[in-house]
Image: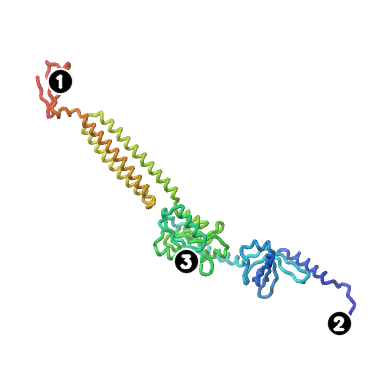
Amino acid sequence: MLQYVEEPGNVISVSALTHEIKAILESEFEQVSVRGEISQPQTSRNGHLYFTLKDAEAQLSCVMWSSLRQQLDQVPKHGDEVIVSGSVQVYPPHGRYQLIARSISAAGIGALQQAFEELKRRLQAEGLFDESRKRPLPQFPEAIGVVTSATGAAFQDMRNTLEKRYPLCRVLLYHAAVQGAQAAPEIVEGIRHFSEGGEVDLLIVGRGGGSLEDLWAFNEETVARAIAGSRVPVISAVGHETDFSISDFVADVRAATPTQAIVMAVPDRNDLLMRIGDLQLTLERRLSDVMQRHRDTVSRFLDNYALHKVKQRIARQAEMLSWQERQMSGILRQRLSHIRERNSHMADAITSAAARRLIQQRSQLSDLHHRLLAADPNAPLKKGYTRIHQKEQWVRSSDRFDSGSPFEIEWTDGRTRHG
């Protein structure tokens, strides 16, 4: 049975007390971050997210309004360890308080970052990051191995980029998980597969972008040591442009994205075609200059009666041409050997053009040689004609002949003196 007593002077109503509590809590905890485990998350018809945040000793009701929930990359699941930031709000009709969440982030990033820094310091002390152990990438790889997920967009982007830039190169995929518990062992196995197989010239290890937890496999020590022990150069292509992973430090080259890794790994075929064109033009100019010098030399020899010397010089020039042909052919083969079957017709065209040019020039030299033989002043003597010499001069007309002075008759096989 209730007993009625005199009401004290400081009695307040429930609502008044509740409002005082509301004012104190909401002003004191206007911005707070709480760590705990998500329990029973539910989304209302209006899109609001209701859940309980708990630990071993207490629990806290939370709500995130739909406008903020839509901005989450991923709605947290039951059992997720998270950090919720927001403000405390008291709901007077029910006499309870709750946390109005403004953001939800995965917990444990601090621990991961600490593990990252510790491993980084240890591997750096071992010299695994030293520039002196970095290997250069092959200039014209024939085959590239890729260790990544077959279902991700990163591999397809790499294939498309390779087809556009340098289709002569083959790309071989080793499928490996790129996040989760099995990611690091599978990535390590993929690296060893290509390193020991000897079928690729270059290895790309990576994936597309993601959170620190998503990319953590590339911060594992086993992956770092597998990259360091690879027998072929390795490009680390983890899709995060601003941050570095341990694999970036250990690899021979770091690419910001998988697509950039292909750009760094192979040349652009359009650039190669331009270089071939420049080489062809340079070769044609050099051939033209050489042949012009030979034409000038032969032209000067036409005024000299010492034909045997001319023949010797022509022979030397022909030998020089042959040597230059061999040298140029060797240079051409050396410079164009890296262009594969798809570009072989270009090399054939250059070689064919050079051969035709040399044949033309040899034909011109042959014509000049015959002209020199035709200009031989002793040719009439060989046909039975004679010359008359008087006073050491060749008498070319009768009005210059002195019948009273001695003279010589020159035959093809000697001279006879008269008078």
Q: Is residue 64 above or below residue 266?
A: below
Q: Secondary structure at mark 2?
A: loop
Quarter of the rendering occupied by the N terminus: bottom right
Q: Which picture quadrant has residue 48?
A: bottom right
Q: Residue furthest left?
A: 419
Crowd tier of the residue under label 3, counting other residues whose Cα lies within 10 Å: few below 14, some 14–19, many 20 or above: many
On screen, 93 above or below 381? below
Q: Residue at x 43, y 63 (%)?
A: 194
Residue 344 vs residue 400: left or right? right
| Cα gap from disc 1 to disc 2, whole angstroms | 172 Å
Q: Is residue 347 above or below residue 188?
A: above
Q: Which residue is mark 2?
A: 2
- Residue 188's label in the rendered image is 3
Lower position in the chain sequence, tag 3 or tag 1: 3
Q: Label 3 vs label 1: CA separation?
A: 102 Å
Q: Is residue 104 left or right of residue 245?
A: right
Disc 1 or disc 2, which is closer to the eye?
A: 2
Q: Position of residue 396 (x, y in %)?
A: 18, 20
**Residue type at tag 2:** Leu
Q: Residue 390, labelled with which disc?
A: 1
